[in-house]
Amino acid sequence: MTVTMTASGAQLVLLALCVCRGSGLQQTAPRVRLSFKELMDTRAARPFSFSFNTSDYRVLLMDQDQGRLYLGSREYLVALDMHNVNKEPLIIHWPASAKRKGECQMTGKGKQGECANFVRLIEPWNRTHLYTCGTGAYQPTCTFINRGWRAEVRRGRRSRLPGRDLPPPPPPRKLSAAEYFRTPNWATGLFVMFPRSLVTPLLSDLPLQDYLFRLVPGYVDSGKGKCSYDPKQESVAVLLNGNLYAGVHIDFMSTDAALFRTMGGRTAIRTEQYDSRWLNEPVFVQIQQIPDSAERNDDKLYFFFREKTLDSSSGTSPSVLARVGRVCLNDEGGQKSLVNRWTTFLKARLICSVIGDDGVETRFDELRDVFIQPTQDERSPMVYALFTTAGSVFKGSAVCVYSMADIRNVFNGPFAHKHGHNYQWTEYTGRIPYPRPGTCPGGTFTPGIRSSRNFSDEAVNFIRAHPLMFHPVYPIHRRPLVVRTGVDYRYTALVVDQVDAVDGRYEVLFLGTDQGTVQKIIVLPKDPTSMEELTLEEVEVFRSRAPVKTMKISSKRQQLYVSSDAGLTQVSLHRCGAYGRACSDCCLARDPYCAWDGESCSAFTPSTKRRSRRQDVKHGDPLRQCRGFNAKVEKRLREMVQFGVEGSSTFLECQPRSPQATVKWLFQREGRRKVLNRAGGALRTAHGVLLTSLNQSDAGLYQCVATENNFKHTVARVALRVLDRDIVLALTARDEDEDEEPGARRAAPLPRAPLPPTPFPPEIRLINQYCQSYWEQLSPKQQQQQQQQQQRKRTSRRHTESQDQGLG
């Protein structure tokens, strides 16, 4: 039986208003929200449980073929099983030397633990080796990792392995660099090069046995131009055909940032040094090769970053702008000008903004993460970019999607040029030299130019002075895909998965936040001109709150790997059972990973042939998909009996599974049912309805009906019975005359005992807390006066009852 406590009407109104205001925005609320403990209870997540003295975990490489996940952290490299991150992890301790740490501390560094080796780069060199780099206590260092399955070769062929007993045979003809296989010689620490045609048949004969993960002994390489000195400076890198392309800060003071190409036997090449027209305090975010055409000489490297600018239109304070840049992979630098510098470097601005109802444009300029989603055409991947607002006062995040066609159109458009008395950016209208700046040598449009060193001086000088394009790149539909404003968090990381459902293919976004949560979001077309955003779930992925640092997704294994400063967690892409036990709950969730199988909401696979699979991501219509199942749910819904006291208040609980659902209360009495419209006061909250000042006419059947996507279903049925107040007080009053001695009543009043914890909803618990705090604020004299008044009322009532009995 539930009997609620009474309180004054004014305090109840204020309390209910506070609760209502704290319910949040429905359009951005996740359908399912799970704490870390609740996530663990679903058995759909697995935190990396091995503890050692490290921090700053970053997922740097995911090898789908070998099923390995490679982490870099402070002084450690870790190889994990992608199926189970806690299954026999392989760990390498790679610290900076004590001497180097001491030298680092002598320079004034190390107050925040920077004088250590923070691993920032792990790239595949071949099937048996990885190339890795770390900050090396402000002295970047690189080396090789021997990884993969232990090779056992027949004795007769072991001597033929390169780098052992025999040097590589001299080639019969001059081979290109791509036709050579390069590997370090363990004894000398030097590279050995030999034709790939010799090695390929040898590697194919090696059987797979135990998995190895260890540093190559005796080999140390300088990390300058490959890894930043300062662990707080972000860097990106990719290893392509033996060449390492990296966006890094290359000096101790982090004042010289550049896009570098090193290794591969080619001359090192970089962006122009200390030229703010090229790079101005950049923060590199992503780097990836994207081919432009079928001609391989047209292949380009695209990199995404943010940088500061000092335009006259923005005043004296620098603003941050998001950029996309590109260079040609076969760029060798200039002959007379831009020697050992990129001669094909171009950049353009990325726009991601939203215009509010008041016409004010909110721009998201701080580029935080980029995810490049492959498509069937390798030349046209989709670029998903995550932005935040600049500054710390207003928190906002947005995700914009760009097409490579739009990006290429901007790079093929006009160049920017500073001109006029205000020295502002304008469109360059002069003559464009041949070949067009940014064109790759030997490509589709320059078949007769074999090297960038053959570019004309005019073309090289033009690109040195005009690396910026005039037009910015706008997102698809010129609006963000996801927007978050007015919330207490920012997005920090982004990955995207393509999911095949019954009614089509959908893109599902996983967004990490600075609060240590991951949101799963799907964006659906609502009509030809607008989109509908659905937040399917939000889960806490770490035991202690920490910003999400990196994320990797494996569609093949249906797993998400999330890292922070404190650790890593492996999370399944779906928890279908959390949506509910009814077909309607599963259908309304509109999660392409899930479908109703006739008994429960379970994971959906396109190969499933069962006729009872019900899924409707596009419309989410339970009336069509769940015929026959909805009536069963209504029949199973139990009617709860709840008691209230006349003149008091009671709370009827109703919590629909979806925050997108609208709730309506129906009241039925004497066979007549109508919408609850109580004149005496009905305060609606996110958890139910609070009925104040009950009377006998409030007794009846209350039904909570939730409506979502035009589907109505009853969430709760409560039969309220209102008890007479005088009878309840008489039954619950204690006869203190029989229990206490007369002297005890005259003693000083005892402090009032705290109210016991109750299993009531949050609103009622807040009421009890208010009453408790009110009592504690009274002085001892006021408490004594109130207890004496209560004692006189009880004595008078017992005296009246004894007179009535005597008269009887």
Image (tube, rainbow, N blue to C red):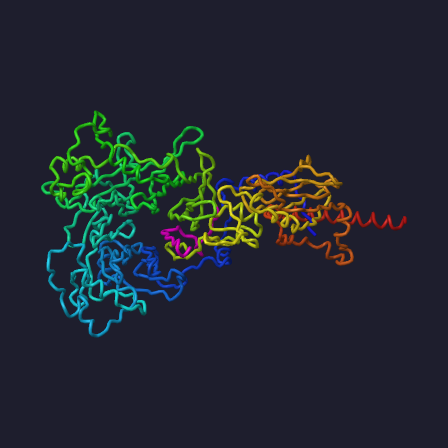
Q: Residue furthest top?
A: 421
Left or right for 164, reference 765: left
Q: Quadrant of residue 359?
A: top left
* Image coordinates for residue 261, horizontal then vertical, percent: 20, 49
**In this view of the protein, which residue sits in the foreground, 601 or 260?**
601
Along the viewing direction, whichever of 664 and 567 lies nearer the viewer? 664
321 vs 565, nearest the viewer: 321
With respect to residue 573, does 25 lie above or below? above
Task: Reply yes or no: does residue 538 show up in magenta.
Answer: yes
Q: Residue furthest left?
A: 336
Residue 240 visible from this viewpoint: yes
Range drawn in magenta: 536-558
Q: Can residue 770 be seen at all in this image of the molecule? A: no
Q: Is residue 224 above or below residue 29?
A: below
Image coords of residue 680 (percent x, y): 69, 36
Q: Is residue 88 left or right of residue 284?
A: right
Tell me what residue is drawn at x 28 percent, y 55 percent: 120
Can you tell which quarter of the image residue 414 is in?
top left
- Residue 363 vs residue 603: left or right? left
Q: Is residue 710 magenta?
A: no
Q: Percent x, y for residue 128?
A: 26, 63
Please name whichever residue, 660 or 154, is drawn nearer the observer in this view of the structure: 154
